[in-house]
Amino acid sequence: MAAPIWQKNTQETIDQTIMDFMAGEDIILDQELIHFDIQASKAHVNGLSSIKILDTDETQQLLKQLNTLQQEIEEGTFILSNQFEDGHSAIEFYLVEKLGELGKKVHTGRSRNDQVLVATRLYLKHALSQAIEHVKASVEACLFQAEKTESVPMPGYTHMQRAVPSSAGMWFAGFAEAMIDNLFSLNSTLKLIDSNPLGTAAGYGVNLPLNRELTTQELAFSRMQINPIYTQNSRGKYELAVLSTLSQCLLDIRRYCWDVSLFTTQEFDLVKLPDEMTTGSSIMPNKRNPDLIELMRASYATVQAAVIELQSILSLPSGYQRDLQLTKGPLLRAVNKALQTLHLFPRVVAGTQFNQEKLIEAIDTPMYATDFAVELSAKGIPFRDAYQQVAERYDELSSRTAQQSIEERVSPGSCNFLMLDVLKKRYLSMID
Ligand code: ARG
């Protein structure tokens, strides 16, 4: 490993086993963050330049090398390997190698504590913007399917028992509304975390008038995170906010996948998935398995596990503690899993094909009992009495059809009044 950036002299003892333990998987994880670290380093250089800590020539040289480093990482010519303690050290090592003494100036007025915070914050903002795009596509896919299947009857279950006729349109519209709610939540989490931690140094500020306004603007944060102690304490807290928003999306996806996995069984046979979304069995030639949606259903567990891991790590006093490094692994793992799942969800929605014949078959006559009781009570019979009467007049239900039942379901939000236009308007008001 290259000498740690904090090593004061060559006599200082460095125990490689201990160093390796402390670095852990940091260097691998930093591969995902280094781009944001470089971006923030450039803003920091510009900030130092604006308060005359760096002159114009020094600024230009540092910016140029940071850009080249970015390029070399993209091209694979600079590899973030475990010869470095972490990504932050790698950036400084590169600058010193290219620029000598000048390279060492990059760390003026900053600490790895605010450096990791700002890189993670930029990463989280980027991840949320991607999640927002996927959720928008999900809303659109669900609304499209809802419109298409508005008049397709489907059994409605409670306690997994046949209850009343429902419609495929209502089922899809429910997921559209869920995803619109998730969009609210994602947007508000994005607003919450849109706060610049750079310039708080180790968590107590520095004796320099750092231009935090400039770095806030340059990094496109909507505000500055002011108090350095709180800024440190928000590490993990903001990550948890992001994970909990993502897990809400995954909770809905889990429900969708659960329904579909059930509906694709031979027993239900209400839904078919396209071939590319199912797999064959290695031993049973007769099988097609819904592995994809099962794995998407399990994504929630990955994110929840990360939430618990983070919550456990965060039992800490104020200020930076190295424990916080361990938030990185679960965070990146969970965010990646969530984004992959959200990315696939609109395709799964578009690929969900209902079997109309089977849907009708699954709606049996007793399922019209509630319609009948409500009709009687609309004519003035107290509902409890109407309920009793229907129990004795089941034979009168046989002339009813599922189509009729869903056409008469006019309460707002229900089969014949899905209010898709209102959902659409709500959605459109939330996107640019
Ligand atoms: N890898 C460290 C982390 O993620 C970077 C910050 C190190 N800071 C320190 N004071 N040792 O927390």
Image (tube, helix red, strand yellow):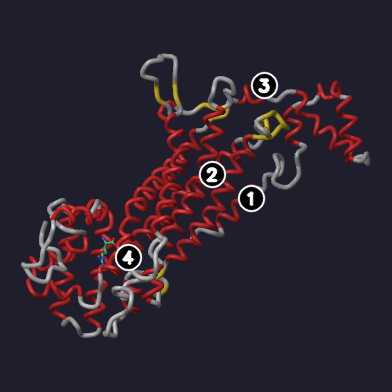
Please, is residue 269 above or below residue 65 in the view? above
Horizontal side of 67 relative to 392 (left or right) equals left
Tag 4 residue? 321
Residues at badges 1 and 2 in contact (C-beta under 8 Å)? Answer: no
Q: Please state the horizontal and vertical placement of residue 304, each as a whole percent of the image.
A: 45, 47
Q: CA distance from mark 4 to mark 2?
A: 35 Å
Give the secondary structure at mark 1: helix
Q: Nearer the viewer, residue 342 or 23?
A: 23
Helix, strand or loop at mark 3:
helix
Front residue of this view, candidates 154 and 265: 265
Within-10-Å neighbours for mark 2: few <14, some 14–19, many 20+: some
Q: Position of residue 265 (x, y in %)?
A: 54, 23
Q: Amino acid at mark 4?
A: Gln
Mark 3 residue type: Glu
Pinpoint residue 278: horizontal percent, then vertical percent.
Answer: 43, 27
Q: Are marks 3 and 1 in contact (CB under 8 Å)?
A: no
Judge depth for marks 3 and 4 and give the one in front.
4
Q: Residue at x 31, y 79 (%)?
A: 205
Label 4 vs 1, first from the N-terminus: 4
State the separation of the CA atoms marked 1 and 2: 22 Å
Q: Position of residue 362 (x, y in %)?
A: 67, 23
Nearer the observer, disc 1 or disc 2? 2
